[in-house]
């Protein structure tokens, strides 16, 4: 890398006066490469991402956000947004550019009587669940506690309440957003309705959301929790049973073929064993849940059956423990209408031939409240299942995992899989451009029109973006 394209070289070229000018405009912290907070501020959950921005603005309010946007545009620097710092695809951090860090936007304000929550984009799911559950309430979030509310919501938000209450975007009442010209807007059904539509599933390419207003629902604190693992040699029987199972709308489940995770309440002696597991949430009467779960608990002799009424928070804690900070991750996804024999066969063969014990294929039930007439940019409401391909490893350089994830995704597409979920696009450097049509499908052209209106210069193009690549 040439000296002038190194973060410190960028700062030198900008000059002290320019940097001081930005610092004078913001009330938050300006973090440069020589700052002791720099490494923490550029760190994200996915250990595969190791990038070095020139400037990090830890914003405190919308004015700080606007100042940072204007600075990036005026200095012709690439801009990225760091929210809850999950960011499996790495779009939160940009080499040699400007990062707007929203960690200070961590407010959670609950109106329990009206069942409404105002939540900041820097908040993690675990804090939202903890705060709302104090009132016996919840809003749809991601499936693990370490997920940031900003990123998971803007991509759609597929979590444990999906079949009962829909996606995260389905519970949004309004958003406060700063667009590319530095202007703050309210986006709702009644104000800037096109922007509201685009933000609900279109990702962060239309502006920077500084507040989400969510509907809350009566959930928990106890729910029915399904945690059952079967031996790997029973995988075909488990998958065939699952494919024929009619899931009640209150239930949302995931089948993972891989290994027994190293999380409580699973005994250490069984952790790491090859297995196929079914994990589920029943967002209703926990006692009713036990009857609903019965067909999936009695397929054959289980290795582990920890199914019982449990705290709603527990499923998210499990997701966090299963996906620790700093591990390397690559995710891919496709949607399918049904679990055909070919698809079930691929789940088995691709997992059995994976290069690492933490690589595997999962099936997420969709449908229910997702499959409605909601008008949002999220495109794949009518699909019954999401196939998730996950590669995970600890060592630094191991392209075999990435190659396996790519090949596995392609093989599912060859037998009828289509589309992709924005939260599981599995995007490595330089690959965003092949994903937009997969993610947005029939919504692509409308999103292109709105992108030209709200971000004509492509300020928010670091990551998922419908800006024509020839114009960037």
Image (cartoon, rainbow, N blue to C red):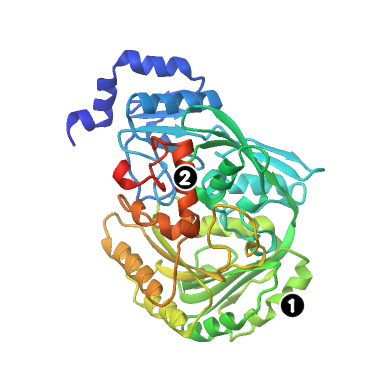
**Which of the image's four quarters has the C terminus?**
top left
Q: Residues within 10 Å of mark 2 (few under 14, many from 20)?
A: few
Residue at 50% x, 28% y is 65
Residue 373 lies in quadrant? bottom right
- The relative height of residue 196 versus residue 348 in the rendered view (above or below) is above
Q: Which mark is residue 449?
A: 2
- The relative height of residue 368 versus residue 72 in the rendered view (above or below) is below
Q: Which mark is residue 291?
A: 1
Q: Position of residue 172 (x, y in %)?
A: 65, 46
Question: Does residue 128 appear to the left or right of 147 in the view shown?
Answer: right
Q: Mark 2 or 1, which is nearer the eye?
A: 2
The answer, for residue 102, to whether it is visible in the render is: yes
**Which of the image's four quarters has the N terminus?**
top left
Residue at 54% x, 82% y is 238
Residue 24 lies in quadrant? top left
Q: Position of residue 303 (x, y in %)?
A: 55, 79
Q: Position of residue 150 (x, y in %)?
A: 54, 43
Residue 192 lies in quadrant? top right
Q: Residues within 10 Å of mark 1 (few under 14, many from 20)?
A: few
The answer, for residue 324, to whether it is visible in the render is: no
Question: Does residue 204 appear to the left or right of 286 in the view shown?
Answer: left
- The secondary element bearing badge 2 is classed as helix
């Amino acid at each position: 890398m040439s000296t002038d394209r190194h973060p410190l070289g960028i700062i030198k070229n900008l000059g002290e006066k320019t940097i001081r000018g930005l610092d004078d405009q913001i009330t938050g912290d300006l973090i440069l490469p020589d700052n002791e907070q720099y490494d923490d501020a550029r760190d994200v959950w996915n250990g595969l991402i190791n990038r070095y921005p020139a400037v990090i603005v830890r914003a405190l309010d919308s004015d700080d956000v606007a100042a940072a946007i204007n600075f990036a545009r005026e200095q012709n620097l690439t801009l990225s947004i760091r929210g809850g710092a999950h960011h499996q695809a790495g779009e939160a951090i940009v080499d040699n550019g400007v990062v707007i860090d929203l960690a200070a936007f961590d407010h959670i304000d609950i109106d329990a009587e009206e069942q409404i929550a105002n939540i900041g984009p820097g908040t993690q799911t675990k804090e939202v669940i903890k705060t709302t559950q104090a009132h016996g309430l919840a809003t749809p979030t991601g499936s693990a506690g370490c997920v940031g509310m900003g990123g998971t919501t803007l991509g759609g938000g597929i979590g444990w309440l999906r079949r009962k209450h829909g996606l995260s975007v389905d519970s949004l009442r309004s958003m406060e957003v700063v667009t590319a010209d530095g202007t703050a807007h309210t986006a709702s059904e009644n104000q800037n309705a096109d922007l509201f539509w685009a933000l609900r599933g279109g990702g962060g390419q239309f502006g920077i959301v500084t507040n989400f207003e969510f509907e809350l629902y009566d959930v928990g604190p106890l729910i029915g929790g399904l945690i059952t693992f079967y031996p790997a040699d029973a995988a075909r029987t488990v998958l065939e049973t699952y494919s024929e199972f009619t899931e009640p709308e209150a239930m949302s489940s995931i089948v993972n073929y891989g290994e027994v995770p190293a999380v409580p309440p699973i005994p250490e002696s069984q952790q790491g064993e090859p297995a196929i597991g079914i994990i589920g949430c029943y967002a209703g009467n926990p006692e009713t849940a036990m009857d609903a779960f019965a067909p999936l608990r009695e397929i054959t002799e289980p290795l582990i059956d920890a199914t019982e009424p449990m705290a709603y928070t527990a499923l998210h804690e499990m997701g966090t423990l299963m996906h620790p900070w700093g591990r390397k991750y690559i995710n891919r996804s496709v949607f399918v209408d049904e679990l055909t024999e070919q698809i079930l066969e691929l789940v088995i063969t691709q997992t059995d031939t994976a290069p690492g014990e933490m690589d595997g294929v999962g099936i997420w039930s969709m449908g229910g409240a997702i499959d409605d007439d909601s008008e949002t940019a999220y495109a794949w409401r009518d699909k019954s299942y999401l196939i998730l391909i996950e590669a995970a490893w600890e060592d630094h350089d191991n392209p075999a995992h990435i190659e396996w994830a790519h090949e596995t995704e392609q093989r599912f597409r060859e037998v009828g899989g289509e589309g992709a979920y924005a939260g599981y696009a599995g995007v490595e450097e330089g690959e965003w451009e092949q994903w937009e049509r997969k993610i947005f499908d029939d919504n692509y052209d409308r999103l292109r029109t709105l992108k030209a209106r709200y971000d004509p210069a492509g300020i928010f193009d670091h990551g998922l973006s419908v800006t024509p690549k020839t114009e960037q």
